[in-house]
Image (cartoon, rainbow, N blue to C red):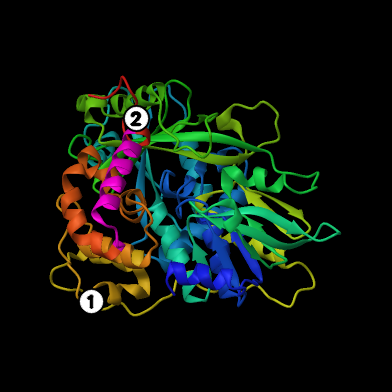
């Protein structure tokens, strides 16, 4: 069914669901995947685009969290490293191993021995050994150009990397395969309760439609996975045990790989505040990240990096790779994400806040926030089990059930490179064969993205605005100079017909996209070239 057919079906009264998930980020997509896979009639609604919030703006790391282990959060780390191993096994090409180098310098924390001890525990929890101690010369082989003054050597270990927005899309695809209805640009307006306060419905409204055009759904189970907005929806009800969300911003810089050619992640403790920061390769670029500070802006506006964050992140490069002489002039793009950290309100520094997730139950409304990208499946299952309650006519699918369908991949076309094909198998799974039918398998210049991927997104992945296509379905607006503006005429040739936009709508979308990129994905005023 098309989007409009789905909405018409809901308006006609076919609107009873076993569970409704609000929020199309990683947690909501994971919850919809688990619910649909468990045989529940499932609806997911997202007020903006899928992965619009934190789940397209994270640091892309699927990791166990060494910093959490160092803080004594053994259970969180154990769950994360085991999920990391599982995801790498299930979805190669989407979740890929990434080697990390932590250089050790004379008189700096942590010492090589201390860090190797921490890594030994990390490997033990994961059930695999990846750690290795490097001499200074070996460290320079892994990270050429690394600062050498006082270098004692380095520690080498493995975590994983993903494209977070594509991970969300893959989960939504899997949920739909099992019968879930998933809609972006549809906002949840009001939780409906019976005389005893129990959930028995929800009103929703499509973006751009008047308030009187709301659709009323029937359900007794709502999973509130709206991230930084979770407390707002929960506060509609009478619960005294509400979540308190502390929005924390983490920002990143994207620079050309040629200006900072790293083939592994290189990490250090920032000289200003001793927080762990890093440079890592991603989508043909190098990324510097991340910051961690309170975000006081309107959550409905795209978050953006500020000037002090730019200088903070550039210092990561000048400290690790002084010879590169990186400056703001080298920055291709930026992104900033808001972490929905659940706080106890104790006045902690942002980096000292607990990153574990929290869950609240309120008579059929289950609100969940916090946690890590890596453990989305565990968080989603916990939320679903809480929604079902005891006793329940439904059973959550077995824990060992694969997250991702393991369909037989088609033969690689000669036109597609091996590395690109591996990525495509992870991004699209069983849909890859259909994607390749009568498709343009040539690459977008300067990237490994295929024109076929843009056409596929326009046809099947609910592209509503141009930024959906260029910032989340693909990352062309992040990895190409000047927001990929020079490429827009060719994008139009490949996509306008599939989107069914007339010339006026296309021009409006271009203007909207370029203004949005300047506001939230470029350097702030005063830092630009």
x then y, percent, for residue 472: 36, 52
Residue displayed at 47% across by 75% down: 177
Q: Which comes sooner in the sequence, label 1 or label 2?
A: 2
Dominant SS type (magenta): helix
x then y, percent, for residue 283: 27, 49
> Where are the magenta residues, as a range?
499-518
Which is nearer the eye, 370 or 224? 224
Q: Secondary structure at mark 1?
A: loop
Q: Which residue is mark 1?
A: 437
Q: Quadrant of residue 454?
A: bottom left
What is the distance, in whole Å, between disc 1 and disc 2 at their CAs?
A: 54 Å
The C terminus: image quadrant? top left
Q: Which residue is mark 2?
A: 152
Q: Secondary structure at mark 2?
A: strand
Relative placement, left or right, of 159 versus 72 is: left
x then y, percent, for residue 485: 20, 43
The N terminus: image quadrant? bottom left
Give the numbered dot on residue 452. none
Which is nearer the eye, 372 or 107? 372
Inspect this view and state whether residue 203 appears.
yes
């Amino acid at each position: 069914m098309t989007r409009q057919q789905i909405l018409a079906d809901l308006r006609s009264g076919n609107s009873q669901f076993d569970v409704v998930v609000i929020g199309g980020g990683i947690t909501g997509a994971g919850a919809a995947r688990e619910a649909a896979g468990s045989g529940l009639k499932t609806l997911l609604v997202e007020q903006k685009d899928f992965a619009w919030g934190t789940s397209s703006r994270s640091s892309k790391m699927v990791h166990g969290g060494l910093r959490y282990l160092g803080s004594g959060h053994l259970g969180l780390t154990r769950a994360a490293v085991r999920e990391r191993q599982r995801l790498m096994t299930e979805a190669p090409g989407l979740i890929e191993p990434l080697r990390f180098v932590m250089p050790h310098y004379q008189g700096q924390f942590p010492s090589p021995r201390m860090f190797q001890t921490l890594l030994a525990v990390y490997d033990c929890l994961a059930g695999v050994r990846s750690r290795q101690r490097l001499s200074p010369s070996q460290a320079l082989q892994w990270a050429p150009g690394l600062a050498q003054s006082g270098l004692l050597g380095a520690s080498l270990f493995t975590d994983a990397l993903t494209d977070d927005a594509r991970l969300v899309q893959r989960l939504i695809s899997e949920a739909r395969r099992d019968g879930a209805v998933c809609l972006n640009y549809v906002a949840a307006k009001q939780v409906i309760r019976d005389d005893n306060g129990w959930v028995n419905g929800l009103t929703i409204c499509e973006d751009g439609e008047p308030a009187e055009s709301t659709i009323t759904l029937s359900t007794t189970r709502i999973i509130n996975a709206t991230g930084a907005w979770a407390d707002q929806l929960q506060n509609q009800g009478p619960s005294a045990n509400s979540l308190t969300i502390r929005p924390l911003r983490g920002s990143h810089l994207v620079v050309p790989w040629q200006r900072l050619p790293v083939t592994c992640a290189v990490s250090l403790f920032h000289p200003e505040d001793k927080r762990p920061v890093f440079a890592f390769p991603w989508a043909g670029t190098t990324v510097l990240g991340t910051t961690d500070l309170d975000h006081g802006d309107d959550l409905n506006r795209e978050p953006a990096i500020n000037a002090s964050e730019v200088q903070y992140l550039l210092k990561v490069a000048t400290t690790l790779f002084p010879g590169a002489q990186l400056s703001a002039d080298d920055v291709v793009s930026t992104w900033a994400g808001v972490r929905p950290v659940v706080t106890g309100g104790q006045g902690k520094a942002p980096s000292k806040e607990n990153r574990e997730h929290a869950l609240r139950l309120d008579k059929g409304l289950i609100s969940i926030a916090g946690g890590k990208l890596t453990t989305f499946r565990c968080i989603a299952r916990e939320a679903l089990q809480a929604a079902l309650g005891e006793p329940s006519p439904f059973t959550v699918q077995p824990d060992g059930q694969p997250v991702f369908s393991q369909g037989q991949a088609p033969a690689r076309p000669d036109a597609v490179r091996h590395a690109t094909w591996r990525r495509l198998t992870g991004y699209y799974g069983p849909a890859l064969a259909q994607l390749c039918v009568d498709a343009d398998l040539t690459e977008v210049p300067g990237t490994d993205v295929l024109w076929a991927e843009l056409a596929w997104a326009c046809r099947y992945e609910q592209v509503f605005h141009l930024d959906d296509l260029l910032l989340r379905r693909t990352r062309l607006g992040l990895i190409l100079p000047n927001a990929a503006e020079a490429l827009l005429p060719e994008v139009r040739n490949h996509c306008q017909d599939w989107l069914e936009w007339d010339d006026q709508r296309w021009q409006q979308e271009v203007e909207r996209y370029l203004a949005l990129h300047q506001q939230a994905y470029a350097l702030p005023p005063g830092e630009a070239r």
